[in-house]
Amino acid sequence: RGAKGRGDEGEGQGMGKSLVDSGAKELSDTELLAVITEGRAGTGMAAWGGSFSPEEILDTANYVRAMQGKLGIVIEAKDPIADDPTAIAGRELFNGSAGCVSCHTVGEAGGAVGPGLDGVFARLGDAGLLEAVSTPSAKFAEGFPVKEIELNDGTIVRGVARNETDVTLQIQSTDGARWRTYFKSRVKSVSDSATSVMPEIYSDLNAQEREQLLAYLRSL
């Protein structure tokens, strides 16, 4: 605080301009952060950008907003592919016509039929990534075994399996929302599947769309 500071309630004392008057409240979030970081010439407001970390600058701004009775400032994370139009087009494919998002999560969005794809490029590299999208049955992702069940009427059920015992196993529905339990004694056969549940969408894409999708997956 101090005799020439802002006062306990931000109302201003001596050199310090009020932080809670209409002028201060009308500052945009960007303007408020700039004032704290760069100071303001001729007002006694020092620049704190050289002394405070970005997190401390944000904390200070949010403290001011709290004194003003306003909501805090939320800094949106910069889009990591904002400058990569090929990857952006690939993300649109992933979330749109290619339908990848219905089975795979990125961040907190997406389906749960296949593995989450955050960090997929670091795990697989270029060759592994290309194989995973172009030939999904070549290698199954760890933790996503696929089983094939032949029912007594000859119907074939295939899907990701879990909780297999000598007596039962569970198969995931194609939309990933449900797990159905099958008793082995009540079906004709249970075997490992050589075919992935992932559709071979990559083969339906043109050359440009393939590069766009790969560019997006490399960014994850």
Image: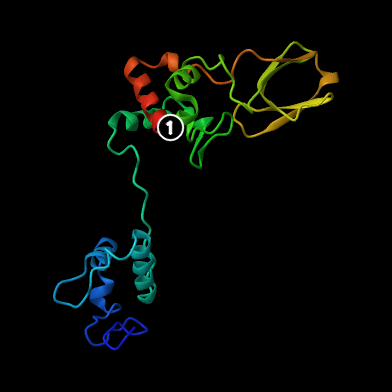
Residue 105, horizontal then vertical, whole percent: 51, 35
Residue under label 1? 95
Residue 63, horizontal then vertical, whole percent: 38, 71
Q: Is residue 17 left or right of residue 72?
A: left
Q: Nearer the viewer, residue 203 or 42?
A: 42
Q: Which of 83 and 180 is in front in this view?
A: 83
Which residue occupies 58% across, 33% down? Answer: 112
Pointer 1: residues within 10 angstroms few (<14), some, or many (20+)?
some
Looking at the rendered image, the quarter that the C terminus falls into is: top left
User: What is the three-letter code of the residue carrying label 1?
Assistant: Asn
Which residue occupies 74% across, 10% down? Answer: 154
| Residue, far left | 42
Work out whether 46 lies above or below 54: below
Looking at the rendered image, the quarter that the N terminus falls into is: bottom left
| Residue, far top | 154
Work out whether 7 lies above or below 181: below
Which residue occupies 47% across, 34% down? Answer: 119
Residue 159, horizontal then vertical, whole percent: 65, 22
Q: Nearer the viewer, residue 38 or 73?
A: 38
